[in-house]
Amino acid sequence: MKNLFLNLKLILIIIPAIATIFISNIADVSYYIFSVLLLLFIVVFRWVGMIPTKYYIFLILIEAAAVIWICYQYKGITYLLAYSILISVWEELNIKHKHTYSLLILIVMDFLFLSEGVLTLFMMNFIFIIFSFLFSSHTFTKEKQDELTIIYDQLRKKHYELEEAKKQVDNFAKQIEKYAQNEERERISRQLHDDFGHQLIRLKMMMEAAVQVYDTDQEQARTIVVKVRDQLTDSMKSLQQTVRKMHDTTTNQYELRTLIDEFVQDCGVHVQYDMQGIPYELYPSEEMILYNNVKEAMTNAVKHGNATEITVSLQYEQHAFTFSISNNGVLPTSIKRKGLGLLNMEERVKLLNGEVSYSMQYPFTVICRLTRNVREEHEHIERTT
């Protein structure tokens, strides 16, 4: 594009200069040719970038002075030389009010050719306006193109940032899932140690007692053995439930309905499942938190509150996802000293900048709220990939 405008400038100088030799009566042609060559030298010298850009304005002023002097001295159609200055104003200078400078050039040219007749003035002004409009349109288009280029670069930068954010979120989700797995293993380990360990010790002591009284009171020994058998049966069922929960599946790992069905079957309580709002897909980390917190809350309701009815409610809102677990069990006197289960629930929710609250009125309710802005980040990243 730069070479195109240079060629256009040279055409606007050379052709009018040659035509003026044949149209006007020039007394000293050699001096006229020298003036035109000097103008061409100034244009080429500046355009090829042989001087710093900050000095362009001075050379353009010299070019304008040379054009005005040639037009004043030789008339003819040298007014076409003024159009070459328009190219300098519109394409080279980074200045404001370019229309004002163009109008100033036109006024000077009208003054110089005022004695050349109405037709000459009309043609000169008409062509000048056409050139100004074309250069103005080109400049406007170029500015819009530059703006679009900047916007494209910004969008590309945002795309890279989103790609990086997606990687971080994926890593974050993996860390949460790993944390949840470790937490579940630790809970099961504690359960095996606390429950089954004590049960085995008690059963061993009962068997020793049965052995001691067998010779003196076989009926009492038989009663003790029957109790041991019954407790072993209960322990085996409990162990089967624990092992089943330890089973790692890749599909429906955090399926809430499956969890509720298994809980109803194992504990014999009535669980009501309620959902409000328009459901949307949860992010894996949110599914994990929902699954583990509902499981923990239902377990606590049966274990500590002796609940027989539990209600699990999911509420899909525009700015948040909320789920609550209420039960008809005994109300806790206080939750200032929270157990390990409640602390784990709160810690999971805080990982996604959520919050956990408790309703101490009947029925006792645990409320977990995940803010929507975290979900929007996940969804936006997923849509761009």
Image: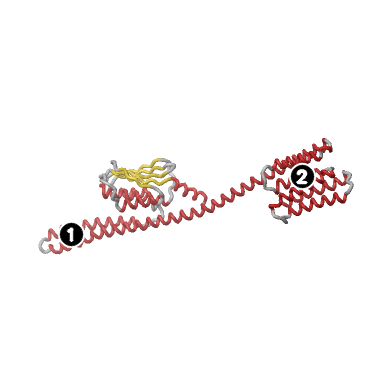
Name, please, the residue furthest toward the top.
118
Element type at marker 2? helix
Residue 364 percent across, percent down from the top left:
29, 43
**Which mark sits nearer the N-terminus, 2 or 1?**
2
Q: Nearer the viewer, residue 97 or 249?
A: 97
Residue 102 percent across, percent down from the top left:
73, 42
The relative height of residue 325 versus residue 119 in the rendered view (above or below) is: below
Residue 46 percent across, percent down from the top left:
74, 53
User: Could you classify mark 1 by the number of other residues whose Cα lies within 10 Å: few (under 14), some (14-19), or many (20 or more)?
Assistant: some
Left or right, 114 with reference to 231: right
Q: Nearer the viewer, residue 327 or 266?
A: 327
Task: Identify the amino acid type marked 2.
Answer: Tyr
Residue name at image x 73 percent, y 56 percent: 50
Q: Nearer the viewer, residue 4 or 273?
A: 4
Q: Which mark is residue 366?
A: none
Q: Mark 2 to mark 1: distance in Å? A: 116 Å
Residue placed under numbered mark 2 in the picture = 83
User: Could you classify mark 2 by the number of other residues whose Cα lies within 10 Å: few (under 14), some (14-19), or many (20 or more)?
Assistant: many
Residue name at image x 29 percent, y 48 percent: 336
Task: Identify the amino acid type marked 1.
Answer: Val
Q: Nearer the viewer, residue 310 or 360?
A: 360
Residue placed under numbered mark 1 in the picture = 225
Left or right, 30 with reference to 96: right
Residue 55 percent across, percent down from the top left:
70, 52
Residue depth check, mark 2 versus mark 1: number of the one nearer the observer: 2
Residue name at image x 81 percent, y 46 percent: 69
Element type at marker 1? helix
Colouring mode (rainbow / by chain / secondary structure / one colour) = secondary structure
| Image quarter of residue 196 | bottom left
